[in-house]
Amino acid sequence: MTLNRRLGIRHPLILAPMAGGPSTPALAAAVSEAGGLGSYGAAYLPAGQVREIIRAIRAGTSRPFAINLFVDDGVAAEPAALAAAQDRLAPYRAELGLPPLAPHGLQVPLAQVFPVLLEEKVPVFSFTFGIPSREILDACRGAGIFTLGTATCVAEARALEEAGVDAICAQGAEAGGHRGTFDRDAEPPLVGTLALVPQLIDAVQVPIVAAGGIMDGRGVAAALTLGASAVSLGTAFLLCPEAGTSAPYRAALKAARDDGTVITRAFSGRAARGLANRFTREMSGAALAPWPVQNALTREIRAAAARAGEAGFLSLWAGQAAALARELPAKELLAIIMREAEDALSQAASGLKPEARSLTPEACTPWPSSSSPSSPACSSAASTR
């Protein structure tokens, strides 16, 4: 059975969960209604609010959707590390009119929120930062909830398969937002999508969803050609009117460049890819609290910056192809992407036909004298597009 059929979707496209603001019930519902799988990043929210969000999505669509949570609950900060992090952030708080000491705390544990997904019979449970407990995965199987884990390397994918997940999201290095790496303290493996997807497909038997740098139909076609069963797009939907992307965040995305993203821990204590800004530059090498305390310490800074229209202090999570983002309603954008993918696949198929492209001895000429004289340079004798 194809992944589309197992998920109950028409198109092999999954909206990436984007916790912390961009995810909205309206965006998730719009993608599901358009034939994809809408997702909501609910990792930072208490159980009651997650329940409200699930019901709000259901009010907008009768089709399947996913709720995403983080597996890593994090650790508390040692007093000295907490004080050092607070001292480092104090000038930014003062600049934004905030008191010098930030409130802090750990995020809501996965074990406290997951029961809501069971009670509300969520169709798909996606997760990142590791593998949920056996009890949670067994509960999903018992309730018929599809599970989708995140892997950034082959070892993580094999561990997810061994745990019994239904599918794996291959998060390439190009992807925006937090790296899904299991070990919060390790330098994340930055394997590109083009390299990661086929290696995961060869390593495991469960379906692979490609993520990272995919913004249009060309990327979708490429991922499917590599053998992915579906794709996951997040940055591509950040400019949709249904997204909760703030005004300064939208403006920064519209000005994005191909070389404009960085991997930073400055905002949360975990490695994440976003658009470079003043905060990522000035906080490079600074004392940080561990995940998720650092995230709590910067929360008020980010909220105040959004209100002030100051993108320099925002976590502008975005993938490396952010410059390709389009400002369109989600339903329209999804339809265009799928048409582009069909066209790209059709063109690729035409290009592979024997009569469409052939090489003859006459088409091969020597390299220029500055190159190796024994290496031929071949050009197509006949090409059709």
Image (tube, helix red, strand yellow):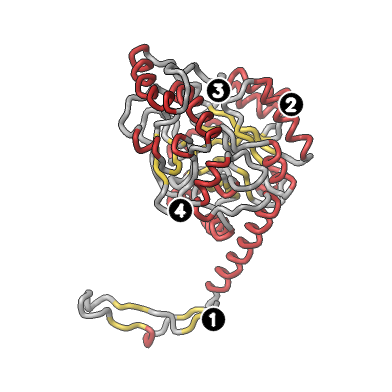
Q: Which numbered disc, 2 or 1, marks the residue that appears first in the sequence?
A: 2
Q: Point out which mark residue 120 bears.
A: 2
Q: Amino acid at mark 3?
A: Ser
Which residue is pictured at 53% across the width and 48% down the height?
A: 210
> In the picture shown, does residue 334 fall above or below 106?
below
Marks 4 and 1 sit apart, C-alpha to C-alpha, by 28 Å
Q: Which numbered disc, 3 or 4, marks the residue that appears first in the sequence?
A: 3
Left or right: 247 as drawn, with respect to 62: left
Q: Which numbered disc, 4 or 1, marks the residue that appears first in the sequence?
A: 4
Q: Nearer the viewer, mark 2 or mark 3?
A: 2
Marks 2 and 1 sit apart, C-alpha to C-alpha, by 55 Å
Q: Which numbered disc, 1 or 3, marks the residue that appears first in the sequence?
A: 3
Callout 4–callout 1 Cβ contact below 8 Å: no
Q: Give the image location of residue 55, x and y in percent.
A: 75, 30
Q: Give the image location of residue 314, x and y in percent.
A: 48, 35
Secondary structure of the residue carrying numbered label 3 = loop
Marks 2 and 4 sit apart, C-alpha to C-alpha, by 37 Å
Mark 2 crowd level (few <14, some 14–19, many ≥20, 10 Å Cα): few
- Residue 167 appearing in the image: no
Front residue (pair 350, 61) = 61
> In the picture shown, does residue 25 fall above or below 374?
above
Which residue is pictured at 39% across the width and 24% down the height?
A: 89
For mark 4, what is the residue? Answer: 194
